[in-house]
Image (spheres, grey):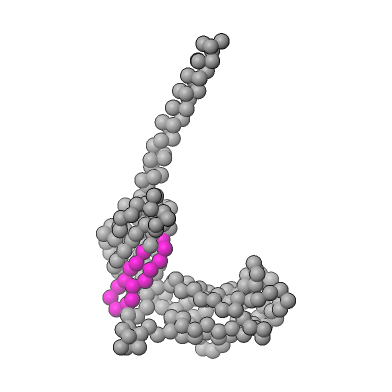
Amino acid sequence: MRGKHAMGSSLRIRAAVILFLSLFPAFVHAQHHSATVHVRLVGPTGLDLGEATVESFKCRGDASDLCGNVDLADHFQHGVGSHIRYGVYDLRARTEGFWSAESVVRVFQDDVGATLQLEIGMGRSEGGLPTFGLSGSLRNFPVAEGPIWVRLAGVYSSTVMDAEANENGEFALAGAPQGWYVLITTQGGRVLDTRPIEIPTRGPVVISLRSEGQSGTN
């Protein structure tokens, strides 16, 4: 009986070892898999600004076990980074005549793109970075279902701004850099409206909320 038990244990151990050895190369490959990262710089209107200079490309602190703590900026040539380990990174890049911009880059495939919107590099003596306001109003909105929020999110930039509409459905946002955005209207856990918008606008924006989940383009 003991002999059969010992033989069964031996077979299980052997099977476990074989399974581990078969999976180990894939595990090592995943741990050290690398990617190519392409950094694209655009201006406020989305036009390409040419070659990017990567100032910093560091693994985020909460992902350092996966991609390490080394700045990989020297892995980039002409805006393209090679041999970048999988992970989550903080990127800072620039080009002549513009402010640097930062973005979070998730590297989990062999080829990754990262687009950053840059702002014209004006000094304080020149008035600083030009910004604009956005105002508007909501129509046909459900008052009894809670407060309504409007979010302005950059298409190319990391700018995100929020404002709560008042009881009359009016809202205002200030300090938005020039560029393309998505304007999102929400209430509770619902998205009531989404629309592209270019800053600066020609005037106040009117959002007609026709039905739940339906987007508008007015």
Residue under the image location 53 percent in, 11 percent down: 2
Pick the front one: 140 or 164: 164
Residue 99 is a magenta residue? yes
Is 22 above or below relative to 129? above
Residue at x 36% of width, y 46% of height: 32
Instruction: Report if residue 148 is visible in the image.
Output: yes
Q: Position of residue 37 (x, y in %)?
A: 36, 58
The answer to whether residue 199 is left or right of residue 99 is right
- Give the image location of residue 65, x and y in percent: 39, 49
Seen from the viewer's position, the closer of residues 83 and 17 is 17
Count up the numbered dots: 0
The N terminus, quarter of image: top right
- On screen, residue 44 above or below 3: below
Picture residue at 34% right of the left edge, 80% below the top: 120
Tell me if residue 110 can be seen: no
Up the image or down, 153 lies above or below 38; here it is below
Q: Which residues are magenta?
A: 91-105
Residue at x 49% of width, y 80% of height: 198
Q: Report x, y in % for residue 83.
A: 32, 52
